Amino acid sequence: MIQFDGLSIILGRRHKNTTATVYWQGDRVAVMIDDTIAQTLALDRTTRYQKLSSKF
């Protein structure tokens, strides 16, 4: 899980202790681990924890 703009984005256990890079435009977010997209989502500002299934 990473913290971004007051929200928590869940990435899963396989990404534990790795460095993530976050790219965003408005409420659309892409999280990169190394050279791979780990998660893409549209932020839901009504909930703190962002679900894995949220997509653009």
Image: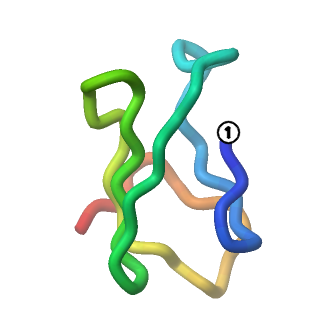
Residue at the spot 52% in from the left edge and 54% down from the top edge: 51
Residue in the picture at 65% in, 86% down:
46
Q: Is residue 17 above or below residue 21?
A: above
Q: Residue at x 34, y 78 (%)?
A: 25
Quarter of the image with the C terminus in it: bottom left
Q: Position of residue 33 (x, y in %)?
A: 41, 27
Q: Position of residue 1 (x, y in %)?
A: 67, 39
Callout 1 crowding tier (Cα within 10 Å): few <14, some 14–19, many ≥20? some
Image position of 40 (left or right of 9)? left
- Give the secondary structure at mark 1: loop
Display colour scheme: rainbow
Towards the viewer: 17 or 10: 17
Q: Amino acid at mark 1?
A: Met
Question: As drawn, is 11 to the left or to the right of 47?
Answer: left
Horizontal relation, residue 54 to residue 2: left or right: left
Image coordinates of residue 49 in percent, x first then y, are 68, 60
Q: Residue 55 sits in which quadrant?
A: bottom left
Q: How many marks?
A: 1
Residue receiving disc 1:
1
Does residue 50 sit above or below 26 in this rendering? above
Q: Could you tell me residue 50's position as x and y percent?
A: 58, 60
In the image, what residue occupies the spot 26% across and 27% down? 36
